[in-house]
Image: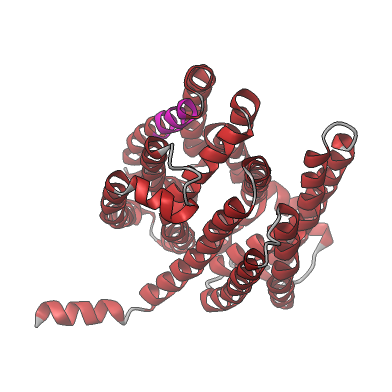
Amino acid sequence: MMVIHQIKSILRRKSLRQGLSVLFDQGLMSLTNFLTGVLVARANDRADYGCFVLGFTILRFSLGVTHSLVAVPFTIESPHRTVDRRSYLGSTILHQLLLTVVLSVSFLSMAFVFSSRDQSLSELMAFLAIFAGPFFLWEFARLVMISLQKYYFSVFLGSAANIACLTCFYFLSRHELLSVRNAFVAMTVIWSVPMLVALVDLGRRAKPDFNGIGSVFLLHWKTGKWLVARSFANFGVVAIWPILITALAGTSATAQYGACMSLAGLLNPFFFGLTNYVRSKGAHVLAKDPGRFHAILLVTETVTLLIVVPFLAGFIFFRKELLYFCYGTKYLDVPALLVICALGNALCMISAQVEVLLDVSKKTFYTFLGRMTGLLVSLGCGIPLILLFGVYGAAWAFLSARLVTLILWAGMTGKVAN
C-alpha cells in the first residue's frame, strides 16, 4: 500500500505532468521528422534523398547556432531576471528576428552562387531560404515558451502542426507527389501558422526595446560564445559527415548514412524532450539551489539508461527487420551500419543530459571542450576511414567521437558538483 501511495503521489505532481507534456511534444515532432524522412526516402531516388539529408543537415547546424546565441542563453538567464522581464523578452525576440533574416538572405545568396554551377544545390538553397523563417522562428518560440513554463500552449501548437504535416505528407505520398521540392513547400506553409500564433502570444507578453538589443546580445554572448563554438565543433562531430560522405563516397553512400541515422534516432523524441525540460526546469531549480546539480544529474541519467539498454538490444537483434519495415529492400545491404549508428546515438543520449546541466550551471566552456575533443577525434580518423571503408568509416568515427566526449564530460561533472 505504501508503494501504491508513493506512485499516486508522484503522478499527482505538477512537474511530472509538465515534463510528460514536453516529452509528448518533442516526441510527436521527432516522429514527424522521422516519418517524413522515411516517406521522402521511399518516394525519391538516392541522389534526391541525399540532397534532402544535406538540406536538413544545414538547417540543423544553423538552428544550433541561433539557439546558442538566443534561445539557450535566454533559458539560462531568464530565471535570474527579477526586473525588466518584458523588455528582456522583447529584445530577445528582436534579436532572433534579426538573425533569421540574416540566415535567409545568406541561403538566398548561396542559391544565386550555385545557379551557374549546380542547379540541384541552387534549388535546395532557395528552398532553405524560404523555409528558414517558419523553421527558426517556431523553434525559437517553442524553446522560449518552455523556458517560461508555458508547456501546454507549446504542446497544443506543435501537435496541431505535426499532425497537419503527417497528413499532408501521407497525401502527397499516396498520390506520388512527395518530391523534395513539395516537401519543403508543404513544411513552409504548415509551420508558418504556429510560428505566427506563438510570436503574437510572446509579443503580447514582451515590450519591444530596440535600444536593448545590444545589451541583450552582450549578455547572451557571455554564455553563448562557447555554445556557438560548440555548435561548430558539433558540426564536425555529427553534421559534417553527410557533406564529407557526399564528397568522398557519393550521394548513394550519403543516403545509406542518412537512412541508418534516421532510424537510429528513433528515440530522439524522448531524449530531446527530456533535455528541453531539464534545461528549463534545471535552470529554475539551480538558480535557487546550485547544490542540487548532482541529484538532478543522477535522476536524468538513471531514466536515460533504463531506456537506452532495451533500445540497443532491439537494434542489435532486429536490425534487418527494422530496415525492411522502414525502407523496404532499398537499404537491406547495410545492417551493420545501422548497429554502429545506434551505438553512437546511444552515447549521444547519455551525454546529452550531462551537457545540458553543465549549460544551466553556466559551465558552457566545459561543453565546448568536450565537443572540440570529439571534433579532433573525428577529423583525425574520420576522413582516412571514409577513404578506406566508405560510409562505415564515417559511422565508426562518429561513434569514437561520442565515446571520447562522454568520458571527458563525466570527469568534468564531479568538479562542477563539488
Give the percent coordinates (x, y) of residue 277.
46, 63
Which residue is depicted at the point 51% across and 16% down? 384
Q: How many marks?
A: 0
The quadrant of the picture occupied by the N terminus is: bottom left
Give the percent coordinates (x, y) of residue 415.
34, 38
Q: Is residue 19 visible?
A: yes
Boundaries of the magenta span: 392-402
Q: Main secondary structure of the magenta part?
A: helix
The quadrant of the picture occupied by the C terminus is: top left
Answer with left or right where residue 316 lies relative to residue 329: left
Which residue is depicted at the point 47% across and 47% down? 329
Q: Quadrant location of residue 340? A: top left
Q: Residue furthest left?
A: 1
Answer with left or right where residue 175 lies relative to residue 323: right
Coloration of the structure image = secondary structure
* Nearer-the-camera pick, 277 or 191: 191
Give the percent coordinates (x, y) of residue 351.
39, 43
Name above or below for residue 185 compared with residue 220.
below
Answer with left or right where residue 328 lies relative to residue 63: left
Which residue is depicted at the point 86% across and 31% down? 117
Would residue 101 be counted in the magenta stretch? Answer: no
Name above or below for residue 220 compared with residue 386.
below
